[in-house]
Amino acid sequence: MNEALLQFIWQYSLYHSQSLTTTDGESVTVIHPGQRNTHAGPDFESAKVKIGNTLLVGNVELHVRTSEWLQHKHDSDEAYRHLILHVVFQQDVYLENQSFATLILSPHIPESVIRQYATLQQTTHHIPCSSQLQKVPVILRESWLNRLLAERWEMKLEEWKDILKQTAGDWQNLLYWRLAANFGFKTNAMPFLLLAKSIPVNILAKHKDQLFQLESILFGQAGFLENDFSEEYPQKLKAEYYFLKKKFNLQPIQGHLWKFMRMRPPNFPTIRIAQFAALVQKSLHLFSKIIEMSCVEEIIPLLQATAGSYWDNHYHFEDIQSRSFPKAIGDHSIHNIIINTIAPIQFLYAHSTGNLALQEQALQLLTLLPPEKNRIISEWSTHHWEASHAAHSQAMLQLFNQYCSSKRCLECSVGLAVIKKNND
Ligand code: SF4
């Protein structure tokens, strides 16, 4: 037993409620367990409990052992003065001269609840409740996944709000930075973001019609134009970059930050930067266009762009390949950008402007895209939780990363269903 489990049992009334009595022998009827208090002070507030013939409304504190009341120094803490009930798993000391009643819950807790919790905590499966997932009602699964998606975005948004402060509330700039980070995917997200931050968006705007200049600024700032080149194109890019660097007083990032290892050549940062330059050229002011779009078919064309022709037969500067083909941003990458940048920015913007309809629309956008494919989504599918769309896969990632992997089953709707079911 631990305090979190005891609180869970109390909150969801997972005990036999008949014949509850205080340590003084008075009957106890729990009408409402109260609201969980996650801040300092008693564990539950506004609980409604009948002790003997007296109806009491107030705070409830829970401990595994009675002595923790003294250990935690609650006896001298004002916040605990209006306690109506002290619920403990075991009584190891008798607390004298207290104004509240004490209820020992252990005899009333079904063994199955503790056993089921222990099973979830002790298993070595990646998803501790995997053997029970198939029995979880669809309606419960759907509503929990919806909440998880909103939670995932709220976490992301907290992070992004700081970025928005750095851009002085400029949404266009936020989109530019987030798009850049997204272009780097997991491996090169950080250097891509540094790259975007090193080039004020107004400098790109000045050259938005000329792909050559956009490439020279982006590749130069990325640290890829420092070598001596034999090909004419990178030589020209380099010359242009040094001119623009001086003109705008630009400071490049360090080239060694980019990673190429274990990466498919089409995902090399050089190709991504070239595609990013093409996207900037096509539409630097994406924000005003995409912010209210609810239709994937309208968004996709805005994100379609192809790297300049030099890259048709290169993956890096001066590595001529025999096979030549245009390096367009693929469907998978576009979906990834909508999932990880466009829809969350729509959601954040809607949130900050109080536009609930747009918030819902941003969430709905993910239901129109195919689910992501990765190790975690495959794991869910092995246990018959199939992601039908990207809203599902994003929620499943959140569930796995934030709950299952740290065994936060007591905070999970599935955990409640699993423990409750075995108690029914
Ligand atoms: S956190 Fe929820 S879904 Fe994950 S293992 Fe625990 S009960 Fe299952």
Image: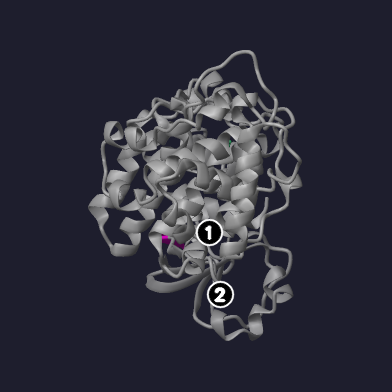
CA distance separating discs 1 and 2: 29 Å
Residue at the image point whose x is 55% and y is 23% from the top: 312
CB under 8 Å between callouts 1 and 2? no
- Depth check, front residue: 266 or 235: 235
The stretch drawn in magenta includes residue 120: no
Mark 1 secondary-structure assignment: helix
Q: Which residues are magenta?
A: 26-32
Color scheme of the displayed model? one colour
Q: Is residue 114 visible?
A: no
**Amino acid type, residue under disc 2 in the picture:** Gly
Q: Is residue 338 above or below residue 76?
A: above
Residue at the image point whose x is 72% and y is 27% from the top: 262
- Depth check, front residue: 277 or 130: 277
The residue labelled by disc 1 is 159
Q: Which mark is residue 41?
A: 2
Counting residues from the start of the chain, the first of labels 1 and 2 encountered is 2
Residue at the image point whose x is 64% and y is 32% from the top: 268
Q: Residue 149 in the image: x percent, y percent?
A: 43, 44
Q: Residue 289 in the image: x percent, y percent?
A: 29, 48
Direction from residue 126 to residue 167 in the image, left or right: left
- Depth check, front residue: 333 or 315: 315
Q: Residue 163 in the image: x percent, y percent?
A: 51, 62
Quarter of the view holding residue 40: bottom right
Q: How many marks?
A: 2
